[in-house]
Image (tube, rainbow, N blue to C red):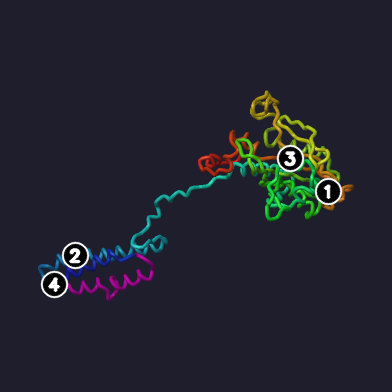
């Protein structure tokens, strides 16, 4: 009997240490311990060799052993069925999951997406153009030929190896690309990053974002332009927003204008942000210059169009109450984490 007990103790240890991995191993375990010729059965047949006065004690030990072998089988099988066995132990699938850190949208993207959604409701679709651009699409086709003084308004980064290539200074390059390739009519908005050789400070940066709008069709008028922009600012800033147009100059539009909205900080009273004028300039716009249409092989006697271009950083700063434009590109998660929902 002593020998039998030692054997049982060794089997117990073996059972406890058997890793619960896979259906095949489970079946091998079942055959070895619980099968018709298995260890448990074999031990029961030893009963007849045990002294009569020890039979009761041995019977109890055997039953406990059998129970242990069966329990192991049951939990192993259950684990397999729920797909949650890990080597050596069963996973508790009822435990709460580990939270995954969720990212948030960048405030510039939130703002851009909001602007885009407003224009999409008017039937504009999104077009994108390259950030590395050639001279033709960034300047010449837009009626800014070489030596044109207005080129200096936008201090340009040129690409050293290929002097005709540059980092686009505005999203207006996408107008030209669209007019060259898209069938008419065209109704697009073009969001994107632009670059200018400017000193980086709290108020300006060497790269920033713009969104460009373009509508070309027969009989498009300045009234259409105004109506479109009125709709936009009312959706963006509320129905009561006050707006004004000022005559301006851009080589690629004629006539040209700039649009101001009532200062969102002081409500038009005059403050540091609006430089005491009560107005904030938000975009440039105008009727596409006939020469620009011709540059893109569009018949300027038949077609007219309007265009506008708007910076994103400045209104986003105002909207979110941020005082330093550099925060947008520093990727500090403590800053970025604060912007969790759309406007
Ligand atoms: N491209 C101009 C800039 O970067 C903005 C602009 C003004 C775009 C008038 C236009 C426009 O399409 O019509 O300052």
Q: Report how far apart the C-alphas of labels 3 and 1 lie in the structure.
A: 23 Å
What number is the disc on residue 156?
none
What number is the disc on residue 50?
4
Of the image marks 3 and 2, the number of the one nearer the N terminus: 2
Q: Is mark 3 within 8 Å of ligand 1?
A: yes
Q: Report how far apart the C-alphas of labels 2 and 1 lie in the structure.
A: 98 Å
What number is the disc on residue 293?
1
Q: Residue furthest right?
A: 301
- Asked if residue 294 lies left or right of residue 25, the reply is right
Of the image marks 2 and 1, the number of the one nearer the N terminus: 2
Task: Identify residue for label 3.
Answer: 153
Q: Can you tell which of label 2 and label 1 is closer to the viewer?
A: 1
Give the position of the N terminus as an image quadrant: bottom left
Element marked by disc 1:
helix
Percent position of residue 321, x then y? 59, 33
Q: Report how far apart the C-alphas of labels 3 and 2 lie in the structure.
A: 95 Å
Residue at (70, 26) in percent of width and height: 277
Magenta stretch: give its range. 20-49
Of 225 and 331, nearer the camera is 331
Element marked by disc 2:
helix
> Label 2 neighbourhood size at 10 Å, few (<14), some (14-19), many (20+)?
some
Of the image marks 1 and 4, the number of the one nearer the N terminus: 4
Q: Report how far apart the C-alphas of labels 4 and 2 lie in the structure.
A: 13 Å
Of the image marks 3 and 1, the number of the one nearer the N terminus: 3
Residue at (84, 53) in percent of width and height: 297
Q: Is residue 59 magenta?
A: no
Task: Identify residue for label 2.
Answer: 61
- The answer to whether one can see residue 65 in this image is yes
Q: Main secondary structure of the magenta part?
A: helix
């Amino acid at each position: 009997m002593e020998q039998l007990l030692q054997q049982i103790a060794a089997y117990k240890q073996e059972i406890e240490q058997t890793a619960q991995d896979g259906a095949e191993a489970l079946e091998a375990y079942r055959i070895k311990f619980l099968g018709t010729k298995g260890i448990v059965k074999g031990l029961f047949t030893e009963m007849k060799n045990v002294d009569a006065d020890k039979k009761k004690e041995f019977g109890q030990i055997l039953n406990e052993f059998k129970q242990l072998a069966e329990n192991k089988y049951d939990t192993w099988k259950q684990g397999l069925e729920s797909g949650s066995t890990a080597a050596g132990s069963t996973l508790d699938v009822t435990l709460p999951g580990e939270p995954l850190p969720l990212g948030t949208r960048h405030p510039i993207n939130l703002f851009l997406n909001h602007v885009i959604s407003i224009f999409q409701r008017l039937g504009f679709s999104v077009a994108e153009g390259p950030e590395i651009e050639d001279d033709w699409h960034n300047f010449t086709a837009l009626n800014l030929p070489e030596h044109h003084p207005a080129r200096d308004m936008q201090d340009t980064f040129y690409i050293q190896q290929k002097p005709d290539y540059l980092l686009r200074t505005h999203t207006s390059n996408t107008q030209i690309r669209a007019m060259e390739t898209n069938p008419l009519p065209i109704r697009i908005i073009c969001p994107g990053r632009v670059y200018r050789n400017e000193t980086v400070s709290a108020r300006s940066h060497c790269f920033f974002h713009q969104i460009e709008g373009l509508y070309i069709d027969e009989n498009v008028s300045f009234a259409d332009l105004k109506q479109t922009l009125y709709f936009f600012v009312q959706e963006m800033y509320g129905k009561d927003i006050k707006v004004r147009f000022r005559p301006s100059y851009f080589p690629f539009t004629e006539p040209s204008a700039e649009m101001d909205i009532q200062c969102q900080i002081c409500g038009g009273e005059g403050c540091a942000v609006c430089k005491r004028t009560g107005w904030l300039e938000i975009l440039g716009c105008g009727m596409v210059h006939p020469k620009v249409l011709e540059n893109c092989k569009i018949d300027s006697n038949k077609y007219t169009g309007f265009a506008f271009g708007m910076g994103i950083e400045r209104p986003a700063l105002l909207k979110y109450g941020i005082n330093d434009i550099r925060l947008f590109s520093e990727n500090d998660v403590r800053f970025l984490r604060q912007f969790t929902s759309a406007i």
